[in-house]
Structures are given as structure tokens and as C-alpha cells.
């Protein structure tokens, strides 16, 4: 039970309009509910969104990234460079194709992989870089692709959180190598569960389709054959119908997210000043309103200036009716990874940020007043626990 009389604000919540409910009903009534005409329409719309590049959809973002690795031919004895601050799916898919994740520390400002540290991690076994655009903020794409070119590496972009983000006026996904998105319920565009991969050419798209359905090369009156190990990772027409409606709503959602993020910066700074906490090192996100899609608004708590920990801050915010999240602790601290010899201390910035990062609520249906309530709540807690 919340101790607050005000309604609980979750850290995120998807928005579905009446048209979406109608679109789903129409698919259910049509008699064709699994992958079919709606999926084809969704993939075509996504391809248009990404400037005409081939796009294929999958059951979730995790399957999308795994298939991206398979399309790139990455497997046993290969190394893939990635970030320790991500949803564990990023490195799990690298392990699942038999390759080895190599973790490079993050930039404390962007909280993304520090591209300046990538070259030192490249070995003769390195095949690809898998950057993650945390909270929707891209890395320096010129630097990324210059690195890849120089060292002859594939790039598999984990753009799960970056649907609608841009780089120098170009949409993430509209250029580059293999670009993977997730449509999971928390993401800026959702199909409930789902994902899509932007590919380089029709041959790669064909290969992705094969991995998506059991490795089938043909099926029909001329018989059936399978030549690679594929899975069952298709997206259904019900999900695709939701995605088509979400795509129409995206600009509205996007504008709202940016406006709410803007308010966060203003209100948090005003509250810190009013509380006399200007020297508290509360780290805000990069104030990037041209490139980020504002998938999340994350702060890094100044734990060494506080007589408390993140869990207590989260508990007290919850008591005020405010939901928060942790995205993410360093992957290298998980038992599976520790057992393989990884250590969080190898990437000290990721280790610190993984312990102190906090996601505040941000979703299109939030009210303006919510931002004030959240900022006041957070700053009040920081003031209470400030070390003298
Ligand atoms: C959501 C997410 C994924 C995985 O997507 P699912 O659709 O949940 O499988 C991968 N990487 C990152 C960074 C994500 O945020």
C-alpha cells in the first residue's frame, strides 16, 4: 500500500487509443491471427520509416538481436564488444550464439559505451561492436562507424530503446549496419512484445526470415528443407496491428516525452536551488533534445554525499506514490557472468553508475503536475539524507 493519498505514478505505462483496440478486434475477427497481411503491412511501414531499408519483425527484441548476430555469421570463438550497462538481453544473446561478450567501460556523461576505449579491447577474434543507446541517446555514430571500418568489424546496434531517436537529423536505423529495435511494452513504440531488425539488403532479409522460422529454406508442394538451425520467432498480425497504430501515434508521444523531460530539468534544478543543494552532485541526463527519443529520464544519485543507499531512496519514493526503476546494474555482476570470470571492477564507471542510477517516471500519459510531485519528492529525500 502506498502511504500517499495521491494516485501512484508508475515509472512507465503504455498508451493505447481506441483505434488500436478496433485494429486488434479487426484482426481477431478476420480469422487470420498469426503472421500474415498485417505483419507485411507493418514491415512495409517500418521500411518506409527507415528510408527504404529492408526490415523484418520478430517475436521480441531479444530474438531480433540473436538473429542479427546469426545473420552476421557470428558464433563460436568470436568476440563481440559491448557495454555492461544494458538490459542483460544484450550480452545474453552474444552468449547464446556461442560467442564471447567483451565489456568496455561507459562514458559517465552519456552512460553509453565509451567509444574511445573500444580500440584497446579489439583482438584478432573480435567480429562486431554492439553498442546500446541507453534511454534512447545514441552514441557518436560517425565515430562508431569509423571504428568499425578501420578494424573491419560488423556493427549490431542494440537500438532497443532508440526507436525515433536521431543522429544529425537522420533516424537511427535509417543508416548503418544491422540495427535492432524492441517493441516490448515499456518501449516508446510497443506491439506488447516484439522487435524489428533493419538490414542491409534483400539477401540478409531472406536469411533473417529463415532464422525466424526453423531454418526452413522451402516449404510447399515441392517438399521441405532446412539448412540452418532456426527458431520460432515470428511476430503475429495481432501485434503488427498494434504496431501500425503506435507508428501513427509516435510523433505525438515523442513531443510529449520531450516536453516532460524539459520540465524535469527545469523543476529538478529549481528544487535543488530552493533546498540549498546546489553542491549536491546529482547527475542529470545529457540535455539532448535533437537526438534522444527520451525513452527514460535517469538520474545518478550522489551516494557518497548521502547517508543512505538507492534502495532506501526508491522505497521512500514508493511511499510517496512514485514508481522508479533501475536500468541497469552492471551485467558483469550477475552470477552467470561472474562465474565466467567477469568482474564489475574491470569497468569501474559502469560499476559506480550501475549502483547509483535511478529511472524516474516518464511516459506520454503523465500529467505536468506529476513532474513537480516527483522532483519535490526526490529532492526532499536527498535533503533528508545529505551528509553534512
Ligand atoms: C528491451 C531491451 C532489449 C530486449 O528486448 P525484449 O523485447 O524485451 O526482448 C534489449 N536491449 C535493451 C537495451 C532493451 O532495453
Image (cartoon, rainbow, N blue to C red):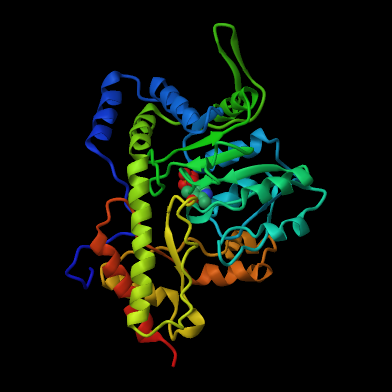
Q: What is the x, y in percent for residue 115?
A: 67, 57
Q: What is the x, y in percent for residue 179?
A: 57, 39
Question: Total marks drawn?
Answer: 0
Check the image and report above or below for 216 versus 245.
above
The residue sitting at 59% across, 6% down in the picture is 222
In the image, farthest residue toward the top: 221
Check the image and report above or below for 248 versus 297.
above
Question: Can see residue 205?
Answer: yes
| Direction from residue 43 to residue 157 in the image, left or right | right
> In the picture, residue 319 is in which quadrant?
bottom left
The residue sitting at 62% across, 39% down in the picture is 176
Quadrant the N terminus occupies: bottom left
The residue sitting at 22% across, 36% down in the picture is 18
| Direction from residue 87 to residue 16 in the image, left or right | left
Check the image and report above or below for 337 versus 186.
below
Question: Can see residue 381?
Answer: no
Q: What is the x, y in percent for residue 331?
A: 58, 60
Q: What is the x, y in percent for residue 38?
A: 38, 24
In the image, farthest residue toward the right: 124
The residue sitting at 68% across, 51% down in the picture is 143
| Direction from residue 263 to residue 134 in the image, left or right | right
| Direction from residue 387 to residue 180 in the image, left or right | right
Q: Nearer the viewer, residue 260 or 11?
A: 260
Q: Nearer the viewer, residue 77 or 17?
A: 17
Quadrant the C terminus occupies: bottom left
In the image, farthest residue toward the left: 5
Amino acid at each position: 500500500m502506498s502511504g500517499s493519498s495521491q494516485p501512484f505514478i508508475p515509472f512507465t505505462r503504455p498508451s493505447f487509443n481506441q483505434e488500436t483496440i478496433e485494429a486488434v478486434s479487426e484482426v481477431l475477427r478476420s480469422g487470420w491471427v498469426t503472421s500474415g497481411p498485417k505483419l507485411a503491412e507493418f514491415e512495409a511501414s517500418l521500411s518506409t520509416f527507415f528510408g527504404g531499408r529492408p526490415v523484418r519483425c520478430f517475436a521480441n527484441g531479444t530474438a531480433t538481436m540473436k538473429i542479427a548476430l546469426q545473420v552476421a555469421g557470428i558464433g563460436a570463438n568470436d568476440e563481440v564488444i559491448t557495454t555492461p550497462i544494458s538490459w542483460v538481453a544484450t550480452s545474453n544473446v552474444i552468449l547464446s550464439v556461442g560467442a564471447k561478450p567483451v565489456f568496455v567501460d561507459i562514458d559517465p556523461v552519456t552512460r553509453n559505451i565509451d567509444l574511445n576505449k573500444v580500440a584497446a579491447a579489439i583482438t584478432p577474434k573480435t567480429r562486431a561492436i554492439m553498442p546500446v543507446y541507453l534511454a534512447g541517446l545514441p552514441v557518436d555514430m560517425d565515430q562508431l562507424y569509423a571504428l568499425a571500418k578501420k578494424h573491419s568489424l560488423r556493427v549490431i546496434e542494440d537500438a532497443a530503446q532508440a526507436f525515433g531517436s536521431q543522429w544529425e537529423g537522420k533516424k537511427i536505423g535509417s543508416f548503418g549496419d544491422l540495427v535492432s529495435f524492441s517493441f516490448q511494452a515499456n518501449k516508446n513504440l510497443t506491439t506488447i512484445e516484439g522487435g524489428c531488425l533493419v538490414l542491409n539488403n534483400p539477401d540478409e532479409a531472406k536469411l533473417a526470415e529463415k532464422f525466424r522460422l526453423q531454418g526452413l529454406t522451402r516449404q510447399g508442394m515441392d517438399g521441405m528443407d532446412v539448412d540452418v538451425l532456426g527458431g520460432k520467432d515470428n511476430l503475429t498480425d495481432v501485434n503488427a496491428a498494434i504496431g501500425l497504430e503506435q507508428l501513427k501515434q509516435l510523433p505525438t508521444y515523442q513531443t510529449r516525452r520531450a516536453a516532460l523531460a524539459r520540465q524535469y530539468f527545469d523543476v529538478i534544478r529549481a528544487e535543488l536551488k530552493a533546498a540549498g543543494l546546489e553542491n549536491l552532485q546529482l547527475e542529470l541526463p545529457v540535455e539532448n533534445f535533437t537526438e534522444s527519443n527520451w525513452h527514460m529520464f535517469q538520474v545518478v544519485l550522489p551516494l557518497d554525499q548521502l547517508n543512505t543507499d538507492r534502495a532506501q531512496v526508491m522505497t521512500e519514493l514508493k511511499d510517496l506514490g512514485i514508481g522508479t526503476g533501475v536500468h541497469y546494474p552492471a551485467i558483469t555482476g550477475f552470477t552467470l557472468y561472474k562465474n565466467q570470470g567477469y568482474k564489475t571492477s574491470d569497468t569501474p564507471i559502469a560499476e559506480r553508475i550501475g549502483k547509483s542510477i535511478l529511472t524516474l517516471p516518464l511516459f506520454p500519459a503523465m500529467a505536468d503536475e506529476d513532474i513537480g510531485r516527483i522532483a519535490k519528492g526526490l529532492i526532499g529525500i536527498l535533503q533528508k539524507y545529505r551528509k553534512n
